[in-house]
Image (tube, grey):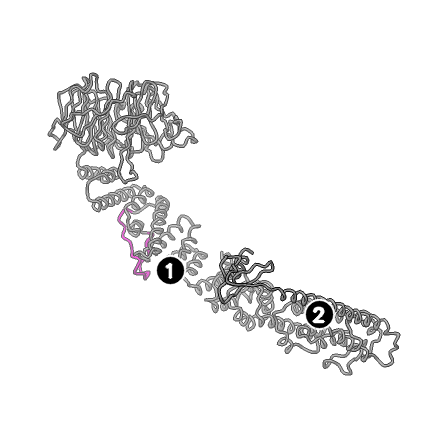
């Protein structure tokens, strides 16, 4: 305990006091005989009577409340609330208003607030809640009178205490407390707790910290948060759970509480034999016992640090002891939080106050740390805004090892006793929470371009890494990815704990890719290693990107040698970094060192990534026929080549479907003695139909493919069937290509096939071009069917042309007559003619437009109308 308040006697013998009110250094007494007396206390001892009204009432003054902002005194006497003016000394409590609608009032409570009006003036709002028999009736002060709010609440009994806190009114009966939420209509009732379980005492209550409610129960003070009763949908809180997150647990007192007053940060209460001063913090809440005030009946707070106590005919002033004096005692007693609360309400300069509070938090934090309450200690360090490095220095084993070559990281000097092994885990967890919050603040400073040290972030992240290695392995990788850990120190620590995977992450985030890849290559062949195999290396190379292309080629080499299929995914995986690699350089790399992968790589580019580059399409075609040539050579030697058919199908499909390759360039390298069907596809792209048909007929002997090709290209070249029949009727005398024999079926004129094609495609071959090609000894009856179909088709076309010509001539004649009729229409435009749109006359020169219905408009009006019509469409 310590002395928080000093007691000064004001009156030792005087009138019989029935009620008391106070504000500032003024105290007002209401007597049993209806007198009102005001005293002013100056310099703690001097007492001056300022006002005295001997005949204010014929009955006792049972309750008083002061509204200092408006200089009003609300008085309850003879079960009626009256209001008087206390602004003028000479008026002696000048009477203002007697509220007849409060007749029968036995107790009242007030709510005083303020708000800005539309003119910017601050207006005081005064509301009253009166207990009139078994009912609560609400009023408000308006223009020198008390008016009704038209809100009332029926009660189960006559209330013994009332307290108004924000949206709630607490009613204390002789056996129970209830609370009413008056923010809803009708008001919602919530049961709180029983007033007493064994002792018959009147209930008492007061406002705690402006928004909490303090109520008595036996020898306990229960603090309730009224906000938990605002939502009517919530369940009512049980007595065992009265306290909320903002409220302390029930506070024990030496005996039953008879009266309560809140004076930040203390609660002062009357008990049986004394007045007790208590705080709301910790387990030992008793701050001061004042036994000399055992006779008091009334307690009232006048202002911060000034309380008045009264007995039947005695009056005392209780004053707060100088805060610096109290603070010194509290620090010695290690009651740091109470010292902080006192400092917050002191009159000291803001800068000095802030510095003092920070120092107290520091003292509290170190005391908690020494007592091994690490979590609370870190919270206090954070409140004190301590440099994170100073906190890290409390853990010598977390500091950087000596001779590590970094000037930014200093070897810490322990300032507290060494921690035991059993305490380290809890200490590390608390430190992690502290450093995580500190890191966020430092990152924000960097992002906002405010002054901060990157070396501090480096220290924090390196320390977090060490903590996670000893507490939470799963958090090691995330902290490394933040890319602020010190390289050398973190590398040494990870090797110490054999965290190879995490070491790879460190190298990767620090840009030490060669070190990471060398380590991966070394670990890939080690039995039992977490990095055994090629998968991690492949993934690492895939994520590097084009800026590290040469490094990718260097370390992709050993992977491709061990497993070409897996290794190729380094260049074909569906990742942005992989897809953006320069494909020409990758292709050159594969061509020079891994030729077997050139075709799979090009196939992936074209089939999966839809690469439209002509050079790569040409390259894939060349790779196909080069490989096919080798396979054909192997097949001629009698070797089994199962892939030949599949590869030829791929080449054929690409030549037929792709339109991105350059046929003339591909044809230059294409062989002439093999793959002639594929050659025909290339020639077809070049529109060399005669050569395509010659290959199908004279080399392959495949009439169906020849006719299929002719049908596909007929719309583009209507002479193609003439070219086809010419190939059959005039066979070549020499082979088309060196070493490629002519097909025996077409070495001479194949009359049967020629006649079949003439009859089938008679409408697509002109007889004037075909007949000269026929053999001289061809009997006329053989071509009768062809000639009939062909000539009929020609005559039909000619007849159709004549009909169309006649129709067009008739239409032309009709249009000429209609035009002549329109040209013969005449009309006059003079100075009296008005525009049908704007109704204005036509000026000279007369530029106008005439509509078919005869309306005439200005040219400018016509343009505007046309524009509006276009916008509507």
Whether residue 709 appears in magenta in the rendering, the answer is no
Relative to 581, 458 lies left or right: left
Residue depicted at x 35% and y 25% = 150
Which residue is most to the bottom? 733
Relative to 739, 378 lies left or right: left
Q: CA distance from mark 2 to mark 1?
A: 72 Å
The image shows residue 506 at horizontal and vertical percentages of 42, 58
Range of magenta residues = 397-417
The quarter holding residue 595 reads bottom right
Q: Nearer the viewer, residue 299 or 354?
A: 299
Count how many numbered circles sit on residues in the image.
2
Residue 612 vertical placement versus 288 (above, below): below
Residue 381 vertical placement versus 108 (above, below): below
The image shows residue 230 at horizontal and vertical percentages of 38, 32
Residue 335 vertical placement versus 443 (above, below): above
Observer-side mark, 2 or 1, equals 2
The image shows residue 868 at horizontal and vertical percentages of 52, 57
Residue 9 seen in the current view: no
Q: Which residue is mark 2?
A: 715
Residue 805: assigned label: none
Mark earlier in primary sequence (2, 1): 1
Residues packed near mark 1 inside 10 Å, few (<14), some (14 to 19) or many (20 plus)? some
Quadrant including the C terminus? bottom right
Quadrant including the N terminus? top left
Residue 689 seen in the current view: yes
Q: Secondary structure at mark 2?
A: loop
Residues packed near mark 2 inside 10 Å, few (<14), some (14 to 19) or many (20 plus)? few
The image shows residue 205 at horizontal and vertical percentages of 29, 26
Q: Which residue is mark 1?
A: 487
Relative to 799, 278 lies left or right: left
Relative to 43, 511 lies left or right: right
């Amino acid at each position: 305990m310590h002395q928080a308040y000093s007691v000064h006697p004001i009156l030792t013998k005087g009138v019989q006091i029935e009620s008391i009110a106070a504000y500032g250094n003024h105290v007002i007494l209401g007597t049993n005989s209806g007198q009102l007396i005001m005293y002013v206390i100056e310099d703690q001892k001097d007492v001056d009577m300022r006002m005295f009204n001997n005949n204010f009432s014929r009955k006792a003054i049972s309750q008083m409340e002061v509204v200092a902002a408006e200089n009003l005194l609300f008085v309850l006497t003879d079960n009626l609330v009256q209001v008087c003016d206390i602004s003028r000394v000479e008026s002696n409590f000048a009477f203002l208003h007697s509220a007849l609608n409060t007749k029968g009032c036995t107790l009242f409570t007030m709510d005083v607030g303020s708000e800005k009006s539309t003119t910017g003036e601050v207006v005081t709002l005064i509301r009253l809640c009166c207990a009139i028999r078994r009912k609560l009736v609400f009023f408000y002060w308006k223009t020198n009178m008390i008016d009704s709010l038209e809100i009332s609440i029926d009660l189960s009994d006559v209330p013994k205490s009332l307290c108004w806190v924000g949206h709630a009114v607490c009613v204390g009966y002789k056996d129970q407390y209830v609370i009413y939420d008056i923010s809803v209509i009708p008001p919602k009732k919530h049961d709180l707790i029983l007033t007493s379980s064994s002792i018959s005492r009147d209930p008492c209550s007061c406002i705690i910290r402006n928004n909490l409610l303090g109520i008595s129960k036996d020898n306990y003070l229960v603090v309730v948060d009224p906000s938990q009763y605002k939502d009517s949908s919530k369940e009512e809180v049980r007595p065992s759970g009265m306290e909320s997150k903002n409220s302390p647990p029930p506070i024990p007192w030496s005996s039953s509480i008879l009266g309560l007053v809140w004076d930040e940060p203390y609660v002062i209460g009357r008990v049986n034999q004394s007045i007790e001063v208590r705080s709301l913090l910790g387990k030992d809440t008793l701050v001061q016992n004042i036994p000399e005030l055992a006779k008091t009946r009334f307690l009232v707070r006048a202002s911060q640090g000034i309380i008045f106590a009264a007995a039947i005919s005695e009056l005392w002033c209780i004053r707060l002891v100088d805060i610096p004096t109290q603070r010194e005692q509290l620090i010695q007693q290690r009651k740091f939080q109470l010292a902080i609360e006192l400092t917050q309400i002191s009159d000291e300069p803001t800068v000095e106050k802030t510095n003092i509070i920070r120092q107290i938090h520091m003292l509290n934090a170190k005391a908690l740390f020494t007592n091994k309450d690490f979590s609370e200690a870190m919270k206090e360090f954070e409140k004190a805004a301590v440099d994170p490095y100073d906190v890290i220095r409390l853990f010598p084993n977390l500091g950087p090892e000596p001779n590590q070559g970094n000037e930014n990281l200093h070897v810490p000097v322990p300032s507290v006793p060494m921690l035991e092994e059993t305490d380290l885990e809890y200490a590390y967890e608390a430190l992690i929470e502290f450093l995580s919050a500190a890191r966020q603040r430092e990152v924000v400073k960097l992002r906002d371009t405010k002054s901060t040290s990157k070396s501090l972030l480096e220290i924090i992240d390196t320390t977090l890494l060490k903590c996670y290695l000893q507490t939470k392995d799963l958090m090691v990788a995330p902290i490394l990815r933040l890319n602020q850990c010190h390289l050398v120190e973190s590398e040494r620590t990870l090797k110490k704990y054999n965290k190879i995977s995490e070491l790879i992450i460190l190298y990767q985030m620090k840009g030490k890719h060669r070190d990471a890849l060398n380590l991966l290559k070394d670990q890939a062949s080690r039995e039992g290693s977490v990095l055994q195999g090629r998968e991690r290396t492949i993934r690492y190379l895939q994520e590097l990107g084009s800026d590290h292309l040469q490094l990718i080629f260097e370390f992709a080499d050993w992977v491709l040698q061990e497993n070409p299929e897996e290794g190729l995914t380094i260049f074909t995986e569906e990742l942005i970094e992989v897809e953006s690699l320069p494909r020409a350089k990758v292709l050159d790399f594969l061509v020079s060192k891994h030729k077997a992968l050139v075709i799979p790589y090009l196939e992936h580019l074209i089939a999966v990534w839809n690469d439209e580059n002509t050079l790569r399409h040409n390259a894939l075609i060349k790779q196909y026929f080069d490989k096919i040539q080798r396979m054909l050579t192997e097949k001629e030697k009698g070797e089994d080549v199962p892939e030949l058919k599949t590869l030829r199908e791929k080449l054929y499909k690409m030549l037929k479907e792709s339109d991105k390759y350059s046929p003339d360039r591909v044809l230059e390298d294409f062989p002439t003695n093999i793959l002639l069907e594929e050659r025909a596809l290339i020639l077809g792209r070049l529109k060399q139909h005669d050569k395509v048909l010659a290959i199908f007929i004279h080399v392959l002997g495949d009439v169906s493919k020849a006719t299929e090709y002719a049908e596909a290209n007929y719309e583009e070249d209507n002479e193609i069937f003439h070219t086809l029949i010419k190939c059959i009727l005039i066979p070549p005398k020499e082979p088309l290509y060196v070493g490629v024999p002519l097909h025996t079926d077409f070495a001479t004129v194949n009359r049967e096939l020629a006649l079949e094609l003439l009859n089938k495609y008679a409408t697509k071959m002109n007889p004037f071009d075909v007949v000269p090609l026929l053999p001289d000894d061809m009997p006329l009856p053989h071509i009768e069917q062809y000639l009939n179909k062909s000539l009929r088709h020609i005559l039909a076309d000619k007849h159709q042309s004549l009909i169309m010509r006649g129709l067009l001539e008739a239409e032309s004649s009709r249009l000429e007559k209609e035009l002549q009729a329109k040209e013969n229409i005449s009309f006059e435009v003079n100075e009296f003619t008005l525009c049908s749109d704007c109704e204005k006359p036509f000026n000279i020169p007369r530029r106008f437009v005439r509509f078919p219905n005869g309306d005439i408009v200005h040219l400018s009006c016509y343009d505007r109308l046309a524009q509006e019509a276009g916008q509507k469409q």
